[in-house]
Amino acid sequence: MLGYIAKRFLNFVVLVLIASTMGYVLASVALNPRGNYEAANPPIPKESIDAVLNRGNVNDEVPFTTRYVKWAGNVLQGDFGEDLDQNRVSEEFSRRVWVSLRLLMLGTLLGATIGVIVGVVSAVRQYELFDRSSSLFAYFILSTPVFLLAILLKFLGIKFNDAIGSTFFFTQGEYTPGYEGSSLGRLGDRLQHLILPTLSIALGSISFYSRYQRNTMLDVLSSDHLRTARAKGLTKRQALFKHGLRVAISPMATFFAYGFGLLIAGAAFTETIYGWYGMGQWFIAAVAKNDINSVSAVVTFTAVLVLFSGFLADVILAILDPRVRSRA
């Protein structure tokens, strides 16, 4: 088992390095920070522009290999350089990363847990009211773009606040600026701000996971090993929990790894709509400003999250299915 984990972790490290490099290459090719200054009126002297770009290691007149070697060496030391406003990217990264992680982790855990449960129950109660209603709800959510779902929830939250004559759902920011209260009160304030953005992410996850889990569970319910367990005297419930559930959940580990990338993409819209200054909102702003170093930092963060979720999925799958370890 330890050998399998070590092998998967090595793959994780290599893939992160490759993904980060590709992110930097694409950002350097697609973005033009020099254009931010050349369009200025009155014109800025070329020497001044070169000085700013050299400080951030984004001067397009410097050979790419030279810039990449310097960038990679700094990143390995935890330094992503400076943005075009001469702020340290690493400092902005450390501030924003926890904003996104709070939102992503809570939304992911809720979405995966509830989605798997809904999928299992839907399969067991196939074509009953719960199955049909959950399927209809899932298809509605999946057919709604992420940004539109976030806007819809924000609109409904405002209407609910108007109806009760008080603010229960907060629709902007992570917390109430200038709020002075006890530690418990500040925690409650942050949790209220977290409700709608988390729902925006969790609802999509619930729909994805429930549909996939339902189909997987239906395959297991009709499998030979489950019929054999029933023939040996086990009740349907006993056979399901003892022999079927683990087999049905195993493929979800792999699905989780691939689905996490979609969550990160959706979080960019969610953060922007709800005024959360996290990694997704930072990425959109950095692209608009042609900020190569900031874009590369966000790509590295995304690569680490997606690939680490894949690494965890491989480990979980190996625990649930010993055949995976034997083939490694």
Image: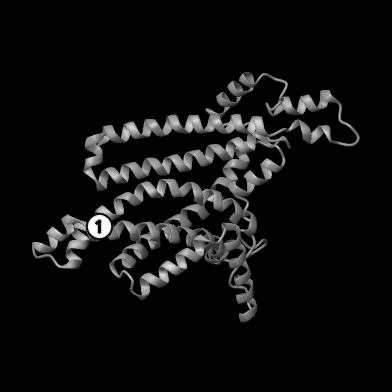
Circle 1 residues within 10 Å: few <14, some 14–19, many ≥20: many
* Image quadrant in which you'd find residue 322: top left
Point out the image quarter for the C terminus. top left
> Taking 71 as reference, is 41 above or below it?
below
Q: Residue at x 45, y 55 (%)?
A: 108
Give the answer, above or below, for where 161 lies relative to 107: below
Q: Is residue 16 left or right of residue 281?
A: left
Report which quarter residue 132 is drawn in: bottom left
Q: Which residue is tagged 1?
A: 220
Residue lying farthest left? 232
Label 1: state its secondary structure. helix
Relative to 98, is 149 above or below? below
Residue situated in front as seen by the camera: 147 or 290 = 147
Q: Is residue 266 left or right of residue 320?
A: right
Image check: 266 left or right of 39?
left
Is residue 224 something that shows in the picture?
yes
What is the x, y in percent for residue 253?
Answer: 35, 49
Q: How many marks?
A: 1
Q: Quadrant of the N terminus?
A: top left
Q: Is residue 78 visible?
A: no
* Residue that extends furthest to the bottom in the rendered view of this protein: 164
Residue at position x 53%, y 66% in the image = 188
Residue 216 x, y percent position in the rendering: 31, 56
